[in-house]
Amino acid sequence: MSTPPLKHPHRRIWAIAGPAIVANSSAPLVGLVDTWVIGHLPAAKYLAAVSVGSLLFSYVYWACGFLRMSTTGLVAQAHGRGDEDQIARVLLRATLFAFLIGLIFILFSGPFRAAALNFLDPPADVLPLFEDYFDIRLWAIPAALLGLGINGFLIGTARAKLSLYLQLALNIANAVLSLLFVLGFDMGVRGVALGSLIAEWLAVGLGFLFISRTLGLRALALAIRESETYNPAKIKKLMSVNGFIFVRTLLLILAFALLTREAAALGEVALAAHHVLNTFMMLIALGLDGFAYASEALAGAAYGKDARHDFRAWVKYGMIWSGAIAVLYAAGFYFGGAPLIKALTNVESVRLAAISALPVITLLPLVGAWCYQFDGIYIGATAGRAMFGTIAVSVAVFIPSIGPLADAFGLVGLWMALMIFLGMRGLTQAIWYPRLERPLTPEDAP
């Protein structure tokens, strides 16, 4: 007996990917607003303090991205089974865990601050301003981590539009409040931090409003009282998935940090050009992450209801769209890469260095599209161990390639090493993929 085809697969993919792309695109605009506001203060130290401070908290949120990923995967699987009680329990565990991590950051803010200063090593005149920023922004960490769990719920239940509204509300509030506090109340660096703090908590309030309108607060209240919510086996699974994704994210951060360090070793021109070229990576992520989100929700739901045929179908359609967008990116970089670089900097030496890497940049989306898409598939299947294993192999290949390629080709060699890293991630995930399907029941099974 043949399995019926999926209904409107392309429309359903775009219903998630489209809002996700718009939401992802709005975040860099807030950074531009903050840069513009602080950049008009009388000294460079203000912009340096915000740059260092925002980088620190970005790393914290990136490292804690497992809260969104694991929540998305577990919620998507429960959603596929139509188990709303389990969705409520997963969401409650995720939000409690997120809030606990946020409180730990606050309680241990002293060692956290010392480690951050040791790692980032800001100039002496920037230090007091950084302290002001840190003391305020610290209190936004619980809200930001709660937001990761809430977004995981919205994406996992395929409510991408609500996730978009939440992200837009956060970013617009952040930008407006920064303008108000810095230009209106002359609060300087503290104004930017306070704007971020208030915006994060406003987004949490809006997120719980969305939850009350969709899942229902009654479902969460029941989950709080149910002993199943605190089932050690379920909590162990959550911790296991979170742990593997967390270490995987740390390896990802390590890879990009090593690239920046090697670019700095090549000189200030190479470092500046490397910073410009990172814009292309940001553009790739904005688009490809949207289709990865669609796979998290749709393939994850199929995985949750043990539907191998549907799971394979969503993998196929996701790969088709990811590949198509990668081709568009490659064409855009080929024809528009040089004009974009020239628009981003007017320093001729930096322009020439960045443009020399364009052949590699053009190939990057074609090579890297598959690891983005596989990440979404693996998250939907909550295959945290496999995500860690595949990226560990990729990093083991990537690290030895950096030095020789940089020595032979300079900045271009660094980006060749990055292309190897992305390609290895996609290759190892493709090799592991049959094991991902193995637990699913074949469609011809009795």
Image (cartoon, grey):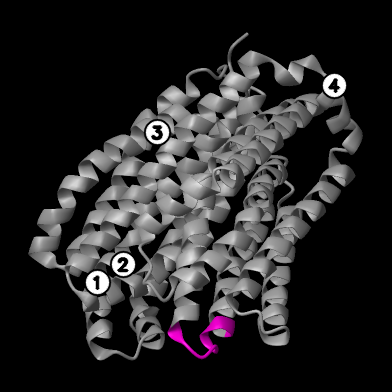
Q: Which residues are magenta?
A: 37-44
Write the residue at 49% across / 24% down. Answer: 437
Q: Amino acid at mark 2?
A: Ile
Q: Quadrant of the N terminus?
A: top right
Mark 3 to mark 1 CA distance (whole Å): 30 Å
Mark 4: few, some, or many residues within 10 Å (few <14, many ≥20)?
few
User: In x, y percent, where is residue 327?
Assistant: 41, 63
Q: Is residue 170 left or right of residue 293?
A: right
Q: Are marks 1 and 2 in contact (CB under 8 Å)?
A: yes
Q: Amino acid at mark 3?
A: Phe
**246 or 101, which lies in front?**
101
First in sequence, mark 2 or 3: give its number.
2
Write the residue at 40% across / 83% down. Answer: 344
Foreground: disc 3 or disc 1:
3
Q: Quadrant of the C terminus?
A: top right
Q: Amino acid at mark 4?
A: Arg
Mark 2 to mark 3 CA distance (whole Å): 26 Å
Q: Does 373 appear in magenta?
A: no
Looking at the rendered structure, the secondary structure element under dot 2 is helix
Q: Does 42 appear in magenta?
A: yes
Q: Which mark is residue 361?
A: 2
Q: Are marks 3 and 1 in contact (CB under 8 Å)?
A: no
**284 or 325, which lies in front?**
284
